[in-house]
Amino acid sequence: MSTANHTLFAESELRALLEREEGQFLEFKSLWDQSVGSRRTLDRRKARDFVAECVAAFANADGGTLLLGVEDDGTPSGHGYPAEAVDDLLAVPERRLRPAVRCHTQRATLDGHEVFVVQVPIAPEAVMVEANGFPYRVGDRIVREPQEVINTRKEAYRRVGYEQRIRPEATIEDLDLDLATRFLGGTVFRGRSAEELLTRYGLILPRAGTPAVTNAALLLFGKAPVLRWHPRAGIRFFRVAGKERRHGAERNVAQLARIDPPIASAIPEAYRQTKGHVRRSEKLHDLFFREMPEYPEFAWQEAIVNAIAHRDYEDQAREIEVWFFEDRMEVKSPGDLVPPVTLDLLRSRTPVHASRNPLIVRLLVEAGLMREEGEGIARMFEEMEASYLNGPELTLEATTFTVTLRNEPIFAGASAEWQATVRRLPLSLAQRRVLVAHPDAFTNEDYRRLNGVDRDEAYREIQEMVALGFVLPAEAPGRGAVYRIAREAAERAARRYARDANAKNAIPPAHTGRAPAWLAERAAALRSYFAEHAFLKNADYRELFDLGRDAAVRELRRLVQEGYLRMEGERRGARYLPGPALGKPGE
């Protein structure tokens, strides 16, 4: 395995990297075992197995960086291995993988702890962990993919990957290096020269004389006129007067703007243009809103940046198009979906990763303009639904991928009286949302789709409403069970809360009375946990209850709200301590 300590990360760059979230291109791994309540050196075989799995997954996807000796929250914690065990650990990519993966490694000391950096390249063919298949990186997870699927994807990129091709007639003088420096100032390598940064991200390739320039570099940072390199790499904006386009004498379409590359300056200009054309919605003034835009900002920004990152640049006859209609906004991007991505997977919010333009994608992620792979579409659904709008509609027709955002609220059909009733009930936002969106009856699937939760969490929250008397028990339990609204009981409760002088016009707390069963179960386990631990982190909670990251965040937020836990710190530095409602071990 080759090592190049002086060419990987300076100490300031490593510390900046530790502030990042784990995701498609970054993984932290502790080399300590704390499962028994006291810290001890992680079993050497487990450590080697993890390195093999993670390196192969990065290599089979779009490469990445593995930091060993670092906790999930980015805290350096070092290791307890002797020199020969360290050598064995760092030799894993060549000894345990087929074909071998040649990584660059770095040993660094941070806060008195030795950590190892493993920089993993994109492999030209599928990489197997001996006797354990072909792992593949999707966001911050590792999945298994068939060898032929990975190889087909890699062969397609080698054959038609527009972004990676060298433009022999272009030189580094055709790039706006000042723009590149500003744009890359958000990465961990800020402070390095523009040419070094471009080389680092594979946008220019060293060679005798002047560096070779890729299409990706020209698309991102090319000097005007960039159209000489690609005639249709920009974005056009249109406004339609009405809900449908008309032609001829009744034409109702006006072109608002056209933005040409480079991408680095086109993205902020596209955001500026869109923000100016997204109106304030009169439809969203009721219930929990005062005044809101037609579409949540994250949703339309993600639709635009995804179009720029994933469009087919081989198609030089079409541009990205953004259309504003009376009832919706459409973002149209040239190109088919890249296997194994399908509409069904995207619509179900299943994390899936495949890049047509991995050089551009990685740069946009590291510059902070794009969510990690597998996160953006799911977050779009969440943001739309949190704004009481239907989730984005995803379609693929004639090699054009379209994201449609509609501005009609899901509660538009509910009466003002029923909305006022629901607002006064002692329920969570998710529970009130389903009562307004489905004022007569709903199913577990309706609840899940509306609130982005899994089946078990939806069931628990529905049963809370049943226990409070606002929802009737399902007549026929099981899949497809229908829960009908107990309107009279809800209206009586709402009038009672309205009479409460202390409530006034405030929204009642998310829970009153006896704790639901799942909270009681979590509390019992947490009491035992805190008998041996001073505090709890998100990663500890996920391991304790075998949950994914999003589910853990939701449950921790609820436990804090109910007083079982109290939170110190923010984001990845957050930790949880026992709250007053938790009581003491043994209670």
Image: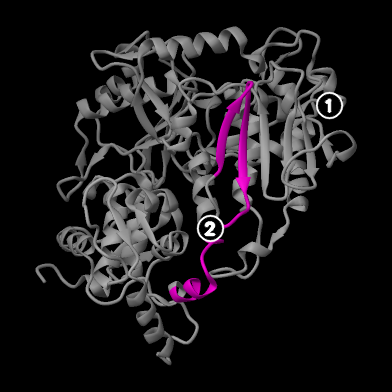
Residue 326 as seen in the image, left or right of residue 420: right
Residue 530 image offset from top left, x and y in percent: 19, 61
Residue 59 image offset from top left, x and y in percent: 43, 19
Residue 73 image offset from top left, x and y in percent: 39, 48
Residue 577: image quadrant is: bottom left
Disc on the earlier residue, 2 or 1: 1
Residue appearing at x 41%, y 90% in the figure: 499
Of all residues, the one furthest to the left in this rendering is: 586
Q: Tell me the mark number nearer the camera, choosing from 2 and 1.
A: 2
Q: Which mark is residue 223?
A: 1
Residue 190 visible in rendering = no
Q: Report helix, strand or loop for mark 1.
A: loop
Q: Residues within 10 Å of mark 2 (few under 14, many from 20)?
A: many
Whether 524 is drawn above or below 544: the answer is below
Residue 510 visible in rendering = yes
How far apart marks 2 and 1 lie (CA) works out to 43 Å
Whether 31 is drawn above or below 101: the answer is below
Residue 129 image offset from top left, x and y in percent: 30, 16
Per the image, the residue denoted by label 2 is 388
Whether 561 is drawn above or below 147: the answer is below
Q: Nearer the viewer, residue 249 or 294?
A: 249
Quarter the N terminus occupies:
top left
Identity, as a three-letter code, of the amino acid under mark 1: Lys
Quarter the C terminus occupies:
bottom left
Q: Report helix, strand or loop for mark 2.
A: loop
Residue appearing at x 47%, y 72% in the figure: 418
User: Residue 411 magenta-drawn?
Assistant: yes
